[in-house]
Image: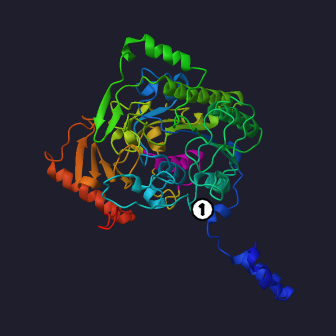
Amino acid sequence: MLHPSASTTWARIPGNLVLLAIFFASTFAIPANPIRCAAADTTSSASRPNVLLFLVDDLGWADLSCYGSTFHETPNIDALAQSGTQFSNAYAACPVCSPTRASIITGRHPVRVDITDWLPGMDAARVKDRRFEHVDDRENLALEETTLAEVLRAEAGYQTFFLGKWHLGGEGFLPTDQGFDVNIGGGHKGSPPGGYYSPWKNPYLQSKHDGEYLTTRLTDEAVSLVESASEKQRPFFMMMSYYNVHSPITADKRTIDHYEQKRSGNNEFSGDTPTIEERDAVTRGRQDNPDYASMVAAVDTSVGRILESLKDQGVADNTLVIFFSDNGGLSTLRRMGPTCNTPLRAGKGWLYEGGIREPLLIRLPQSFTSNKQQPPKIDSVACSTDLFPTVLEVVGLPLQPELHADGSSLLGQLQGQAASDRDLFWHYPHYHGSLWRPGAAMRSGNYKLIEFYETDSAELYDLSIDIGETHNLAKSQPERFREMRDALRQWQHRMGATMPTPRSSSSN
């Protein structure tokens, strides 16, 4: 197609030359993004598995019953864990939402896509006595990036649906600009516009009546899409991206009474909520928040309804199901957050385990497990960047490492194969409302290094015996400490990571 701005110029050229030029342009032109322009391979699409990706916002590693919570109740998610594989060492690529979301749908590290903070991020000028200038990154996911939805749609004819929180750009950068056929509720904001109860102010989801609870409405829409998609001879990819359990913490009225009674009637949760000091911040020391628990329950009910809809449509056995969170639970603030990530340290915004270790559940289609059961648990490391190549391999598409450059398929592990050794890296050079200050981290084997740029310090932990990161080994293992610190810096250099720069002497 000719660009509209060229119409005047082309009008001056004789018609036969115009036709000849158009012929050569359409015949020999190489598209800027081949994936976007590729014809869909529908020859075997009907037999390919559906893909259902549940992504929960701010859900902590310990927020589910299957991960140890005794206050929250998640029977439907627990059942999913029992029918698939539960990962104990899965990580988000960043301790905040937008970078991890970008890493999921591109298979690329946040540094590589230049989204290293939530959008638009917190202005560093808000931080008193800060050492560094504000670090700028992109305000949206570049259209030049190739998303999982684009690959599935272009190369295998998938129907692609997005529901809920997007937070990777507004008009011009919405899910429908990034490979999704349908967008229900996804815009540039991270919190639900107008709140969780209608009438809300979400331009991509009009309320039907006052008093609707957002998660329930999104679930209704998801069930409807499963029903309509199953009638077509094409597989679907659905990304159900919940706004829950992000602030503002807003109780689901259906279950709040239950959790308030549980809080008041059980000695395990009686008395004042304990707290844990974390530098200038405070971490919640126990899960006992009824409002938050009801929001977790709303997600669990939704997961159960959508999984049941797969059964009703006869496609459950041919659907890959993934459940994940975009960062750790919000536990650490100036006045403690709504949840607790214990035994992990700190929470959202921090590079301690509480900010980046996530619940990850994967259930393969039945064709992969007819002869051999999935391992119930996997302890080797996994990362948000791994979901892209895992989906490709499960649905029978070739891996494309030039795209998902920082991800590795988990299918082999899900089929009982041993995992290869690899290091994971985090780069978070921003100030955050949780009172985190710029830094970075690396995990190599069981060891975890965290750098704090504000104080020119670093810490080393052995997670195999110290999951709570309480015993700093920097002095007792100086050689390992130096090697990991050098490896982190080398990785940052290779990736072209933007490092924070000290404030000038004239800065206020």
The picture places residue 426, in percent across and down from the top left corner, at 37, 52
Q: Is residue 20 visible?
A: no
Task: Report the magenta stretch's main SS.
Answer: helix
Residue 166 magenta: no
The picture places residue 221, in percent across and down from the top left corner, at 70, 36
Q: In the picture provided, is 113 more to the left or to the right than 12? A: left
Above or below 491: residue 77: above
10 Å crowding of disc 1: few (<14), some (14-19), many (20+): some
Q: How is the image coloured?
A: rainbow
The picture places residue 479, in percent across and down from the top left corner, at 16, 53
Q: In the picture provided, is 172 more to the left or to the right than 85? A: right
Q: Can you name the residue that lies furthest to the right here?
A: 15
Q: Is residue 108 visible?
A: yes
Figure quadrant of the C terminus: bottom left
Q: Residue at 51% of width from left, 24% of height from top?
A: 74
The picture places residue 69, in percent across and down from the top left corner, at 42, 24
Q: Residue at 61% of width from left, 66% of height from top?
A: 33
Q: Residue at 33% of width from left, 48% of height from top?
A: 421
Above or below 65: residue 441: below
Figure quadrant of the N terminus: bottom right
Towards the viewer: 330 or 357: 330
Residue 387 magenta: yes
Give the image quarter of residue 328: top left
Towards the viewer: 342 or 315: 342
Q: Say how many tags the image has.
A: 1
Secondary structure under the numbered disc 1 in the rendered image: loop
Q: In the picture provided, is 21 more to the left or to the right than 284? A: right
Mark 1 is on which residue type? Leu
- Give the magenta part as a residue range: 383-399
Towards the viewer: 432 or 31: 432
Give the image quarter of residue 179: bottom right
Per the image, the residue denoted by label 1 is 143
